[in-house]
Amino acid sequence: MKHLLSAKDLSHDEAVMVLDTAEAMAATQRHAVKKLPTLRGKTVVNLFFEDSTRTRLSFEAAAKRLSADVISFSAKGSSVSKGESLKDTAQTIMAMGADAVVIRHSADGAAHLLAHAGWINVPVLNAGDGKHQHPTQALLDAMTLRRWYDPCGERSDGSPAPQGRDLAGAKVVIVGDVLHSRVARSNVDLLTTLGAQVTLVAPPTLLPVGMEGWPCEVSYDLDATIEQVRPDAVMMLRVQRERMSAAGGGYFPSPAEYSHSYGLNLARRSAMPEHAIVMHPGPMNRGLEITAEAADDPRSRVIEQVGNGVSVRMAALYLLLADEGNQL
Ligand code: NCD
């Protein structure tokens, strides 16, 4: 594989291989000196047309830990605000000698366009395009789940998963603003490829039309789903108010109503199986989709997800760059 554009592009074995590589990368991060010489002399360009904290910082950390040089570009303060096109920006960046481009953009398909329009000829890694895909987020979620889910039904302690393991049998409930979420889409694709069973829970107004083909269950009732599915993990999605206000709002009656029906609180946390973990891609709206108590609960893996993000992005950069894409 030359690019990492969509979780859909990964076969079962490729996904397991990326996760195994991420575990190998994580093992190196426990050493006093974290830097590996693998990508010395290569330049990774981060093109961020949309705001980001975790994803941008962790792609940057991942590239630097592999000894690559990093050029970071954010649209604010650049000539994009003067109307420069994606094509011109891409070509400018290429002229500076990039070996890989990481892109986040508010338009669905932007990463695909950059990879296939013929403007550049280096690997493109999609760091989130509109409502469409965010494959490295799904990979870091899968890495977190693989560490905490034990297929033998025993309580797992979060230690590195054995090489080759997938997520067969894991039950994952994803809750909230599915309509605007590239995280939900990418996770439905990747987690089911890895054998997990996924249930999406949202109010009807926050579900996209045309979900018939999605390989998952859909419910409007969070309490009933927790009771019936007995999930191994519950992943909360951020209510994406910036995308809602652009469309005039009105997706749910009030924030209090939303929290009441779809928020994760300690009561719902206690209704989940003892071993189940709580996930959220961040940034969290504390008090809206998750209470502070649930976010800081001992079974919350939110901070660990961020750490795993660095390992997964190191793996992706390594597999696409160090081996000229021959492994992926
Ligand atoms: C997500 C994103 O940007 O898609 N965040 C992230 O990458 N950590 C989810 C979100 O913004 O809600």
Image (spheres, rainbow, N blue to C red):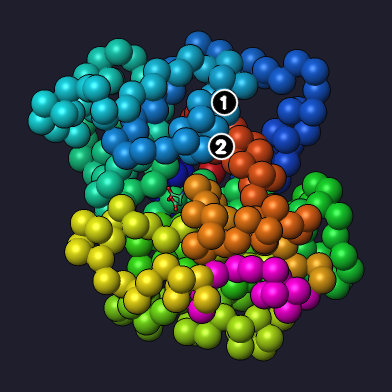
Residue at 79% x, 28% y: name it.
Answer: 30
Question: Magenta span covers which residues?
Answer: 261-273
- Say above or below: 259 vs 299: below
**Where does residue 235 sit, x and y in percent of width and height?**
59, 64
| Residue 89 visible to the viewer | yes
Q: Is residue 244 left or right of residue 291?
A: left
Residue at 37% x, 81% y: name it.
Answer: 204
Task: Report how far apart the C-alphas of labels 2 and 1 lie in the structure.
Answer: 9 Å
Of 140 and 119, the residue lying toward us: 140
Residue at 56% x, 20% y: name it.
Answer: 64
Q: Secondary structure at mark 2?
A: helix
**Where does residue 282 sit, x and y in percent of width and height?**
52, 49
Q: Do labels 2 and 1 touch, CB within 8 Å?
A: yes
- Say above or below: 22 vs 242: above
**Label disc, if present, on residue 110 of the rendered structure:** none
Question: In the rendered structure, which amino acid carries the disc numbered 1?
Answer: Ala
**Where does residue 249 sit, x and y in percent of width and height?**
25, 66
Name the image quarter holding residue 51: top left
Q: In the rendered image, which quarter contains the C terminus?
A: top right
**Label disc, if present, on residue 61 of the rendered structure:** 1
Q: Is residue 80 left or right of residue 233?
A: left
Q: Secondary structure at mark 1?
A: helix
Question: In the rendered structure, which amino acid carries the disc numbered 2?
Answer: Arg
Of 177 and 103, the residue lying toward us: 177
How many numbered marks, from 0 up? Answer: 2
Q: In front: mark 2 or mark 1?
A: 1
Residue identifier under label 2: 313
Magenta stretch, main secondary structure, is helix
